[in-house]
Image (tube, rainbow, N blue to C red):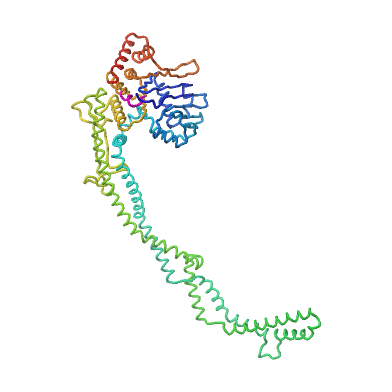
Amino acid sequence: MVVSVLEEMRIRSLGVIDDAVVELSPGFTAVTGETGAGKTMVVTSLGLLLGGRADPALVRIGAKAAVVEGRIVVADGSAAAVRAVEAGAELDEGALLISRTLSAEGRSRAHVGGRSAPVGLLAELADDLVAVHGQTDQQGLLRPARQREALDRYAGDAVAAPLAKYSGAYRRLRAVAAELEELTTRARERAQEAGLLRFGLDEVAAVEPLPGEDAELAAEAERLGHAESLASAAAVAHAALAGNPEDPEGVDATTLTGGAHRALEAVRAHDPALAALADRLGEVGILLADVAGELAGYADNLDADPLRLAAVEERRAALTALTRKYGEDIAAVLAWAEESAARLTELEGDDDRIAELTGERDALRAELGALAQALTDARTEAAERFAGAVTAELAELAMPHARVSFEIRQTPAADEDSGIEVGGRVVAYGPHGADEVELHLAPHPGAQPRPIAKGASGGELSRVMLAVEVVFAGSDPVPTYLFDEVDAGVGGKAAVEVGRRLARLAKSAQVVVVTHLPQVAAFADRHLVVEKTNDGSVTRSGVQAMTGEDRVRELSRMLAGQEDSELARAHAEELLAAARTGGAS
């Protein structure tokens, strides 16, 4: 007997549930009751406990919050135990306590091992603790994508290893293709940009401007344009300071300053204040002499060449043409030229980049083709084993002549550029390879295998789903399985076989089944019934463990809708007896 993983759930104010305790045992537990009650009690609560979506509508009307608590036994060193401890949780004598609180306003809180935790942690733990399967999973199995996922899961590392390499190469190919597409589709725009930059750089290179040249030429042009007035002003100023040789009787500033200085020098010994003024006049005289000398040199050195002025104005016009297009001054023009040269180098390198990316794209497509072939080979080998195992399980589920098979095919690509070469053909591909996987069922001899979406009835689909899960239990087991009406559409002998097979599965795992079939419930080691009560204003639900006579009465109700029917009671006792003798066969 396996050790129970999920021991107990406590539920408060969830929908019609006011306060209930679901105690689960090792082995096979059946949950029955009025339509919908068992599902609400177990499936919805367990879904919340394992990180499912929190819907505030689940909170009981008038209650502030709904709370679900669970006690789960985890083995030392198990993935779930290690992950919980990493998150700061503490184990209680080998058990992990988990709780989820959902407020009426929609807020959700989770606690793991006495510590507050993100809801995402509950979902991580769920992967290693409980597998939940319901009617939606059956419908999901009709989709080829889910069938491929199921096959890949069964194949394990044989598919997972090449698929991981394929996924990495696929993502890189998508990135390379996107960059290549961007470069090629914008080639005309980039060529136009490069042409404009090249033209502008040629214009700047033809002029060869120098830093600060525009300011220097502006000053020179101003000076050359007013050379005559500048020379005349300099001559008048020089004459005022140093005198005019052609006017011997004229008075100049230098002569007057010298006379004043000599007058003070004669009496400076009598008053220090006057001596200081004499010194200052001496300095003024020296300064006037220096200025007069420079004015004489200025006039001699002044260039009034009209040819030079024309050359300066021509150069300034060339610089102005550049600043009008490429910057407010020559410094800005030179900065633009530097940036544009770098951009032109980048644009001119596109051809090299396109060639590089094209080579990488072709290499990646070849690599993807080889990896896709490896995936096809691994899936084909696993498909034979998987189909054989599911077929064997269907024989145990009252479908002895049914045959399950997989069709693995590839779709030809629209053209060579949109596909990869696999097995000598160019085929379409995607993030999971080039294979399209489809599960086929031949329910009886002589019937052609058809996709289960088209060839399986509701009851057959339920049994195929159960067979798949039983095969998974052997190849990739989890401690606890919850089946939500996985027996829908099954009845009679087939229902008995479903119950028997679930009982066998419970020998190696904890199995919880929400069912409305007495043939299935009879095989359970523990039978729980969800009951509703109504006091006229409030509806409440609770859970009761059925044993002995109570269990017979519940099975009678499920069989005939009458708890006291003698025929139903006899049939119920017969079912229980058959389950006790045949459940382990």
Q: Nearer the viewer, residue 81 or 554?
A: 81
Q: Nearer the viewer, residue 510 or 180?
A: 510
x and y percent of residue 210 in the render? Answer: 48, 71
Q: Residue at x 33, y 50 (%)?
A: 177
Is 508 contained in the magenta span? yes
Q: Viewed as shown, does residue 34 lie left or right of 290?
A: left
Q: Viewed as shown, does residue 486 lie left or right of 88?
A: left
* Residue stretch rendered in magenta on the structure: 504-511
x and y percent of residue 165 in the render? Answer: 31, 45
Indicate the quadrant where residue 351 lies. bottom left
The quadrant the N terminus occupies is top left
Q: Nearer the viewer, residue 198 or 514?
A: 514
x and y percent of residue 238 in the render? Answer: 65, 84
Q: Nearer the viewer, residue 338 or 9?
A: 9
x and y percent of residue 28 in the render? Answer: 35, 22
Q: Viewed as shown, does residue 237 lie left or right of 515?
A: right
Q: Residue at x 69, y 91 (%)?
A: 248
Is 545 contained in the magenta span? no
